[in-house]
Amino acid sequence: MPPRIACLLVPNLPLHAEIRAHPELATAPLAVASGPESRAEIIAASPAARSAGVQNTHSVAQARAACPELRVRVASPALERAARAALLDVALSLSPRAEIAPRTPGLFFTEGKVFLDASGIQGLFHSEQGFASALLARAEAQGLPGLVAVASSRSVALLAARHRMSGGPPLHCLPPEAEANFLAPLALDLFDPDDRLAQALTRLGIHTVRDLLRLPRRGLAQRLGPGIFALLARARGEDADPALPEPTSTRVEEAIDLENPVDHLEPLGFILRGLISRLCERLALRGLACGALDLRMGLEGGAQDARRIGLAAPSLDLRVLLRLTTLALAERAPHAPIEHIALGSEGVPSRIDQLDLFLPRGPDPAALGRTLTELESICGEGRVGMPQVLDHHDPLGFALGPFTPPGRESPSPSPDPPPAPLPALRAIRPPLRAEVRVHGGKPAFVRSAVAQGDVVMAAGPWRTTGYWWSEEERFALDHFDLQLSDGSVIRLGFDWIKRSWQVDGIYD
Amino acid sequence: MPPGPLSARIPLPGVQTSSESRIQQLLDDFGPRLQAGETLRNARKQQAGPARQASGIPAIDELLDGGFPRGELSEIAGPASSGRTSLLLSLLATTTRGRPSTGSGAELAALVDTPDAFDPPSARAAGVDLRRILWARVRPWSEAMRCTERLLETEGLPLVVLDLDQSGGPSPRTRSEPPIPRSAWTRLARRAAASRTALVVLGEQRRAGEQARVALELQPARARFTGFPPLLEEIETRALLVRAPGAGRHRSVSVRLGSASQDVKSPG
């Protein structure tokens, strides 16, 4: 059975990329220009602008004269790149093999297209029509309305999609046996031959595929150049391209070039919301969640500011991701106004877990992941996780690692009985300074913000030292356990480095 | 056990003798129980978990009729060195390790730590399985309430502890905050009920008012130093049940929290 290839084609991609980033422009007469100057060429225009008389190849000045209320945006490579990548995500949401076609010069330079494997889709979609409809709907949901054609090769699928640009329903499923008849009357302009070849064919009065295939083969290359053979192969519906690849990268990036530099957090929040929202939608298409966020900002003056925002667990929660990003920016604001923002993330699968009939129902890993991320957005980065005891002698040392609880275990509890409850310590972070009166080498009276009184009972001292080789980390402490006359039982330390007394904790 | 009716009805053609005997054995063991629905009932019971979260200190569990109730807000109040943290760590240890006596398995617990007073070495020494503790270090209390609410929305966490004790040090930012409104406690109590989570609030004094189903007040008695050179051996405390459903309130017990043993000295 011949392979089936679908082509998702978005004409006027620069226009849709702009509307995708600025949805408020969807109904306005909008045109995208090739540059900021008034002589720049209009490369794409919205239906409202077209109906007002704006055409491609108009200059910006001509377009404004035709439509005074026209909104003109300069084509943004960052937005266009993100829109092309989004097309690939749409394709990968329905097929494991897909490839984005590179931007080509020529007549169709504003179109965005992606090819995907449409073989064996009957089990899921019943028909190619159903598959194409689903593809089209997903692309539209991403703000990229387009055309879909399914054929036996990339070349024919692309031609079938381009053919529908002039009118007709946006779906075209071409059976293999109908391809030759479909191709024969097609205008050669749809193949977008290079200028020299196009002129030569026009001189010879060859306008359609049928005319081209009737040409005698002999001496064709001498008369029309070597490019004619590639055109002939495409006209016959032959595909010389290699098989579609299976992309392995799960990285997703959204970016935007700002018209006016932004130097306040509040307007930046609106821009970030859009970026994160589009990023999450793309990740959701591929069944992934957002791992760490990589925020890259181009600043006025050419400087760059890049930072990574860690997440406690993969998440697609827009509110939480936005809060984490704004917290990170508020904590360390960029030193100059921002001209360009790119937000990327490595897509990671959400946590899944198998329920067990015979164990208490633990939290759903995905829900727990969302909770962790939200807690981190409230508490701050690095303040939520699993407590860890460090493998060294610093009595005040601890760590907070990522919360990855062990899997479900057998219903039988731990065979070792828990140890008898000890007097537990409540840590005081940072330790509180204390005034201490010493008698006979031991504390006799303590005054601090948490406890004060004569020492009733004392144990200690115990000396702990460590990291003597490091000026910053070294410690040397003498600790006492003391019961004071006010009833409190405290852990008092003498810091030999600072030569001061401190209360490290309260036994409670 | 004689073969059950289910096994009698299932033919086993073409199965090798050793496999057949094993399958037969399984059918003998489980067939009648499966048919009677016993396994499913047990499974549902196991999934639901116990109705109370035991503290692991027999005297306290007896006072609380088995432990802190799930789906309810409970409070532990008392001054510094009254044994609140020791009781809390014992509760966390029991939850994260499971209880051999009741057969309940190891579960997760969350701790919202406003004073940043949780001491991992101390918790490990008390038997807490730190891998099952979700520790959120948060200030001020308004954020702590949000964290707790979010945790209670996560179904499947049997125990959430909210530590609001500020006796461990002056925290100007926290001390200058307005008191926690009653509506916040109502919301937490409702969330705990919806998720069947035991919510335990710890502080110097009771704060949740009538929203707390159980309130335990601890009063420090004495600390015991033994041996030569002397070592802090145990803290003796008195636990008074000031709020509980039914007629159980105003009972008290003395508890010794120490390395030697813990026991009930004199029920009040």
Image (spheres, coloured by chain):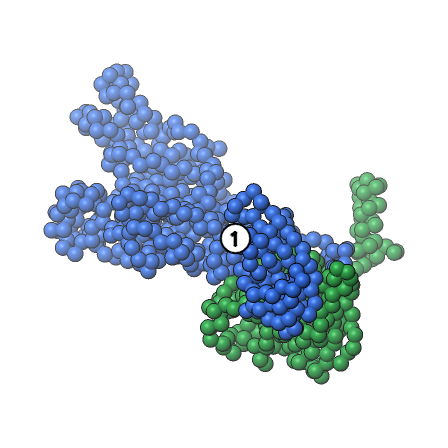
Residue sitting at x 26%, y 56%: A25
Chain identifier, green in the render: B
Q: Nearer the viewer, residue A60 or A445?
A: A445
| Residue A165 at least partly seen | no
Q: Nearer the viewer, residue B237 or A319?
A: B237
Residue sitting at x 21%, y 29%: A195
Residue sitting at x 46%, y 39%: A249
Residue sitting at x 26%, y 45%: A301
- What x and y, as percent, mark residue B241? 69, 78
Q: Quadrant of the C terminus of chain A?
A: bottom right
Residue furthest to the front in view is A440
Say above or below: B68 vs A125: below
Residue furthest to the right in view is B2
- Mark 1 element type: loop
Q: Is residue A276 left or right of residue A192?
A: right
Say above or below: A362 vs A181: below
- What x and y, as percent, mark residue B85? 65, 66
Q: Mark 1 — residue?
A: A313
Chain identifier, blue in the render: A
| Residue A235 at least partly seen | yes
Residue B192: quarter of image: bottom right
- What x and y, as percent, mark residue B160? 60, 65
Residue A187: quarter of image: top left
